[in-house]
Amino acid sequence: MNEQRAYLNALREENERFAASHGRQRLAYTRTYGCQQNENDTERIRGMLEASGFGFTDDERNADLVIYNTCAVRENAEQRVLGRLGLLKPIKAERPGMIIGVCGCMVQQEHITEKIKRVHNHVDLVFGTHALYRMPKLLYEAMRSQKTVTDIENSDGEIAEDIPTKRESKYQAWVSVMFGCNNFCSYCVVPYVRGRERSRLPEDITAEIKRLAADGCTEISLLGQNVNSYGKDLDTEVDFADLLRMVNGIDGVKRIRFMTSHPKDLSDRLIDAMAECDKFCRQLHLPFQAGNDRVLKQMNRGYTKAEYLDKIRRVKERIPDIFLSTDVIVGFPTETNEEFEDTLDVLRQVRFDHIFSFIYSRREGTPAAKLDFVLSDSEIHRNFNRLLEVQNAISKSKNEEYVGRIEEVLVEGVSPRDDTVLSGRCASSKIVNFKGDKSLIGKYVRVKITQAMTWSLNGEQAE
Ligand code: SAH
Ligand code: SF4
């Protein structure tokens, strides 16, 4: 980071010269695709940009610098980025000096970076997930070069601490505890684009959270592709259960969440810590992906349907009112209609509060990409719609259990449709909308739940 700091300063001087001669600040536009890890990475990108003297704009057409932080998990996220890059070409033609950067998981794949250079030669800067902290140097070079500056080197195993961060919210923060994934599920590109698991040191994580708490942040979400393997690569004995207890002890923190956990590594030690930590938000995201044992094996998930259901049973036993969510893939190439019934069966048995469902997307370089499909597109879509139908009814009925309860809601902002309506989350993470004054944003408010919708709850301020 020391070398990068020198580049931050050089960029800042250059941006100051620009501001003096043009009578305005250079503006950056960022756009994030994909998961919370990417959101968190964009916060770091914005932190570095702010430290190097950029202002920000919400309109690409006013931007001097555009950065897309991309996702590679499914093809449609990639198509969207490529489409937008095409749209930027005429905008750049009218804005000499505009810099276009593409970073993140998608460009960590060599074939995509080659394609961008071939088809979108108006892109100035391409850097992968491992090069994030080197952005100041790369940007400095891109501002001087006629060619596309590219850095998609693989990780050297180190974690860059102390990257400046500009957070979206003052009250809630994503805190990465580890990077990468070792699981190699057969359909998934993440291990290839994010590299092997690397845990941050517990003292670095707690120091960051203490700083956040001192700044008024009360809700912390611990992030990792598979938080249950936290610490396995460190020389210390600390595991994720210990880390959760450490964070629970930090003054000023009121709520702790985490994601994602892998079912195969969800230990009783962690379930105990979840049950015993008073600030833990009684919420668990535990992706099961598919219900059929043959499919799970071919997905390389490392558990059976019965083992998954048993873990859920243990969690519910210790924490009866826990909010459960999951990820499901429909249309894994060899999954038959009959095997898909097992996925529906898991939904009915567990009764998740919320699910994230995806149609399988073929990812180049993964083992599943070589498999032939047994179902047609229309059969897969029919199964997907059945899944939504089954789950929507469950989500609604789980929401109905909240009607009449008083919930403590951390107010996040106003509703996008009506600015007299506030929107926030209760401890279990359900979205709650209620009428109230904007001054309540960032505060905890007691709300009486009056109505259950499929995706959210409505209520009124209690007392
Ligand atoms: N590490 C997390 C998830 C990371 S990716 C975990 O294992 O739970 C987020 C979700 O995207 C996955 O849980 C999976 O449901 C989905 N996903 C991953 N690869 C996919 C693919 N090739 N096609 C469709 N969905 C996919
Ligand atoms: Fe992908 Fe599996 Fe790793 Fe999750 S655990 S990121 S699905 S390989």
Image: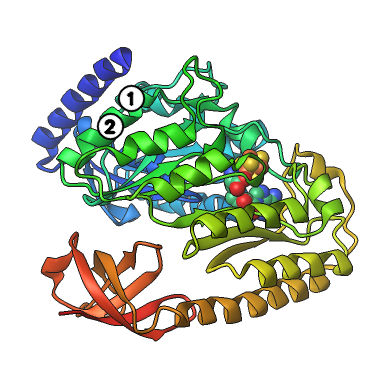
Residue appearing at x 87%, y 48% in the figure: 371
In the image, residue 338 sits, relative to residue 4, either above or below, namely: below
The amino acid on which the numbered mark 2 sits, given as a three-letter code, is: Glu
The amino acid on which the numbered mark 1 sits, given as a three-letter code, is: Asp
Q: Say which element carries label 1.
A: helix
The image quadrant of residue 215 is: top left
Q: Nearer the viewer, residue 164 or 227?
A: 227
Q: Nearer the viewer, residue 264 or 299?
A: 264
In the image, residue 54 sits, relative to residue 399, either above or below, namely: above
Q: Is residue 258 left or right of residue 425?
A: right
Q: Is residue 346 left or right of residue 354?
A: right
The image quadrant of residue 373 is: bottom right
Q: Is residue 68 left or right of residue 205?
A: right
Look at the numbered disc 1 and say if its residue's Cβ is closer than 8 Å to ligand 1.
no
In the image, residue 410 sits, relative to residue 90, either above or below, namely: below
Real-space CA distance between mark 1 and mark 2, rounded to the nearest whole angstrom: 6 Å
State yes or no: discs 1 and 2 in contact (Cβ < 8 Å).
yes
Q: Residue 436, percent across and down? A: 17, 77
**Label 2: few (<14), some (14–19) or many (≥20) C-alpha neighbours in 10 Å:** some
Numbered circle sitting on residue 204: 1
Numbered circle sitting on residue 214: none
Q: Would you name the residue on which mark 2 appears?
A: 208
**Label 1: few (<14), some (14–19) or many (≥20) C-alpha neighbours in 10 Å:** few
